[in-house]
Every structure is written in structure tokens, then in C-alpha cells.
Image (cartoon, grey):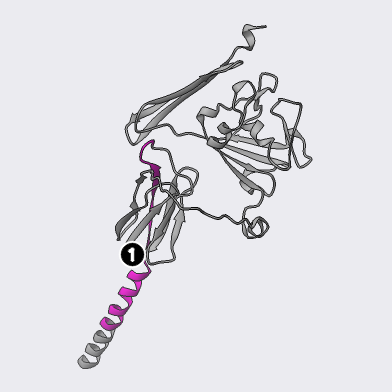
Amino acid sequence: MHLFGFRLYIIFLFLISGIVPVLQAQTRFTISGNVRDAATGEDLIGASVIAKGTNNGANTNTYGRYALTLPAGKYTLRFAYIGYQSVEQEVDLTGNKQIDIKLQTEATELKAVEIKADAPRNQLERTQMSKVDIPITKVKELPAIFGEVDVLKTLQLLPGVQSGNEGTTGFFVRGGGSDQNLIILDEALVYNASHLFGFFSVFNSDAIKNVEFYKGGFPAKFGGRLSSVVDVNLKDGNNQKFSGSGGIGLIASRLTLEGPINKGKSSYIISGRRTYFDVFT
């Protein structure tokens, strides 16, 4: 009996020694954090995070955050974004980790590039249809009425979008009414987006980071609207140094101030615009 019990004990230890490594290999942990611009502290949207040597990766969301779940082990993470220097970091993953990364801008001189378009095929392969990303830098490059750069007037230039009265910010998408457009500012619903009888919108271009415009097939998270969704994202503020911008126009003046509260961690941005309409009436 003692010999039989000893054999069972040996078999039990053998089974346990084989099960424990398997359980350890199946243990998974999450790496999360923010990817920001090293100079301004602005969140980088769509930056890629890849675990080299694996097929696992993630992209940052509209707040610059990412989350990547991997089995326990040692990895080399590569952080990359267009126009910025890539960063690689070694990680010994034994538990959930928070890794925040700041990327430096990088100017690269390229040789002549031949670009071939295949728009119909790309539209078929994309999971999100009828979406247009509009960086505020592109909006500011367009001619503006009375010198006032306006996001909603820029949307009127896109295919499938028709403007209302000449010079106003109202717009109609694919035959829908102007009240069938959902306009969101940092996840807050904007009920009245026009100002000064519709000559320009309430959005101050100096405080805007980017605009996402959905002409159809918009995600269910936006609720029920028939024509379109305009998702406006504001800047987070420069958490590295104080800066300001502004301008004086024929019908309005604007001023934007931003800077760090706790350098590298928190920031503020104050933006305002003043029209002269009441002065002349």
C-alpha cells in the first residue's frame, strides 16, 4: 500500500509540473497608455502599437489611448505615427502595465513618388463607409468669407453636400433637411451651430483639432439621424509650453491661449471670438 501511494504521489507531481507551465503560458495581461506629441502634448490619433515578432497590435483612439492584451512574456513594442520618429521599448510582461509614450516629429525627404488611385476598390474594402476626416490645417488653407475660417462652410464643398442660402453655414446632405444633421462637439450635442444669422458657425477654428464627417452609414453610437454626423474634436492644450494664436478680421476677432498646468501631465486652453455686429446696429 505504501508503494502504491508513493507511485500515485509521483504521478500527481508529474501532472502538476506539466499543468503549471501551460497555465502560465495562458495568462494574459494588458498594456495600455497614451501616445502624445513630445513638443505640444497633443494626443496622436491612429498611432500604431505593435508587438514585434507577433501578429498583435493596436491603434490609439480619438483620445490617444491604446490597449494591447498579450500572454505573459518579454516583448519589444514599436510605437509609430506618420511624420514622427518611431520608438521601441522592451517590456517584461508579468502583469498589467501602463506605458505612456511621447513621439518626436521627424522630417523625411523622399524621392519622387508615383501615386495611383484605386478608389472604387478601396471603398469596397473599407469597413467604415462614407466617412471623411478633415484636419483643421486643411480647413485653414481654403479661402474664407471676410477672413473667418469656418468648418461648416468647408463641409459644403464636399461631394453629396449642398449649401443653403449663399454665404450661410446651413447644409443639406444627400437630399436630407438641415435639421437632420447631427453635430457633436467633444461628445456633446450642439443644437444650434450657426452664429450671426448663419453667416458663420459657432466653432472657433483655432481651438479645433480635427473634424470627422459621416455622410451615411454612421455608427450606432451616434443615435438616430437621417442625413449626416459632424463630430468636432477640440485641442487638448499644449502641456509643454505656453503659446497663443489669434486674428483680426472684418467682422470678428479671435484669441486662443494654451499652456501647461502641470508640465507634461495636464494643460489648459482658452479660446474666444468676438463679432462687431452689435457695434454697427
Task: State the residue at coordinates (44%, 27%).
Answer: 269
Indicate the quadrant containing the C terminus: top left, top right, bottom left or bottom right: top right
- Expressed as whole percent of the image width and height from the top left, the position of residue 132 reads 62, 45
Residue 193 percent across, percent down from the top left: 65, 28
Where's residue 168, x and y in %?
Answer: 71, 25
Quarter of the image that includes the N terminus: bottom left
Label 1 SS: loop
Q: Residue furthest left?
A: 2
The residue at which mark 1 appears reads as: 72
Q: Is residue 173 left or right of residue 84?
A: right
Residue 141 among those drawn in magenta: no
Place of residue 238 in the rendered image (x, y in percent of width and height, measured from the top left): 40, 32
Residue 256 in sight from this viewpoint: no
The residue segment tinted magenta is: 13-40
Question: Based on the displayed image, in which of its 4 quarters is residue 157 positioned?
Answer: top right
The residue most toward the right is 175
For residue 183, what is the image quadrant? top right
Residue at position x 57%, y 33% in the image:
141
**Nearest the camera: 233 or 67?**
233
Identified by mark 1, the residue type is: Ala
